[in-house]
Amino acid sequence: RRGGHAEVCLTRGIMCSMFSKDARMNTPTAAPLTYRVTLSDHARSDAQRADILAGELGFGKYFTDHMVAIQWDKAQGWHDAQVRAYGPLSLDPAASVLHYGQEIFEGIKAYRHADGSIWTFRPEANGARLQRSAARLALPQLPVAEFTESLRQLVAVDHAWVPSAPESSLYFRPFMIATEAFLGVRAAQAAGYYIIASPAGAYFAKGVAPVSIWLSEDYARAAKGGTGAAKCGGNYAASLLPQQEAYAQGCSQVLFLDPVEGKYLEELGGMNVFLVYQDGRIVTPELSGSILEGITRSSILQLARDRGLTVEERKVTIDEWKTGVASGAISEVFACGTAAVVTPIGELKGKGFAVGDINAPAGEVTMSIRKELTDIQYGRLPDRHGWLVKLA
Ligand code: PLP
Ligand code: COI
């Protein structure tokens, strides 16, 4: 493949009948897409790739040789689907994404099983969330079946980049941007959908060790009626200053409270949060309209229910966390998300207070939920909920 230049047409049709017409989303009838595959003429050699995969992968540092690109415009709908060499995008400087932040993204992984096969986890949930994000950001909706197919198309070419080291995976970053060159403030009439992929190890530098969390009291990441429930770049831009504050305090993530009363837990900059009670209850903030509905969150709720645990999705005040940890009523706290998987939270710090013990070992419930979830993802436990989808 290296040095070569091949052009292949894959004629795998996609059935998109359920998304045929939705005037609200101004998405014309979705025709089955055919991907044009152009192999990179500067792909890394097998030895270069093996070198990268054998090293410390971390998170989001390395990218595979190819990417997916699909274009959309109001007249044609989705068209020009390609798998092509990973590389810079060419954008008109007037493209609306650069001015008004019309952008959304997803995060989903591919897992290599012991037999070499490659699987992903609940792609229809990520595809549906991308549609909800698109609706909120006035971007076009990619059919869910096409979302899954686009992952499959990238893996068909870059399968060798799916690592096999324990707990490693290939992290996909699907994203959509408004590309129309027009400075008027309205929804763009042209957009691009892309996927890049990154072989990934642990999100946090210390691996699965407990992390410290900083409570942001001066900043919110979302507003009532805002975009908090959408996975759009703007939410993360709003989290970066408080995230810097967290780093300055020796913490690795920031915790946000509700934007109205500043009293209830929402989530971390890039993860949902759970409290485990001594009496066995598992509690997580209810979906408030400004929290991202995590697929890891929903999977953990299901696994906890399967275990017969009492699961509570409700409002949780920051005082409940502070006093519960101090009294011992709350025995464990953890964060969860695709990138972070399940990460124990050892300590919560804020202006003038700290609760928890960063040096305490990771909680048992946290680690056993983490193990059960990853055992399902890596094919070590039966997939009793039908969450896995084979990619290759
Ligand atoms: N909350 C935020 C703000 C996130 O960025 C993420 C990560 O995607 C999550 C929660 C967890 O979502 P998921 O479990 O679907 O990855
Ligand atoms: C994910 O877990 O997929 C995320 O998007 C979190 C963060 C890396 C932005």
Image (spheres, grey):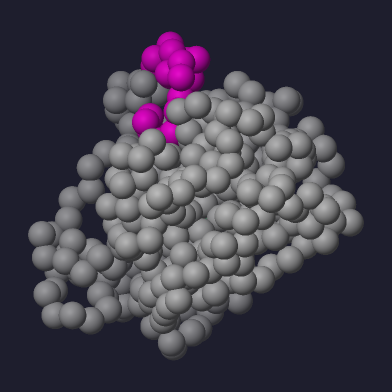
What count of labels does the image hold? Answer: 0
Name the foreground residue: 204 vs 186. Answer: 204
Residue 306: where, in percent of width, then height? Answer: 86, 55
Q: Residue at x 14, y 80 (%)?
A: 184
Name the foreground residue: 162 vs 98. Answer: 98
Q: Is residue 353 magenta?
A: no
| Residue 246 found in image quarter | top left
Q: Residue at x 73, y 25 (%)?
A: 114
Q: Residue furthest right?
A: 308
Specify the segment rendered in magenta. Answer: 45-63
**Residue 52 showing in the rendered view:** yes
Name the foreground residue: 167 vs 241. Answer: 241
Name the foreground residue: 354 vs 11. Answer: 354
**Residue 30 showing in the rendered view:** no
Q: Is residue 49 above or below residue 362?
A: above
Q: Is residue 55 magenta?
A: yes
| Residue 169 found in image quarter | top right
- In the rendered structure, the answer to whether residue 107 lies left or right of residue 69 reads right
Q: Quadrant of the N terminus?
A: top left
Q: Residue at x 82, y 37 (%)?
A: 381
Q: Is residue 16 above or below residue 33?
A: below
Residue 182: where, in percent of width, then height? Answer: 13, 74
Residue 303: where, in percent of width, then height? Answer: 79, 52
Q: Quadrant of the C terminus?
A: top right
Q: Residue at x 37, y 65 (%)?
A: 220
Residue 47: where, in percent of width, then height? Answer: 43, 11
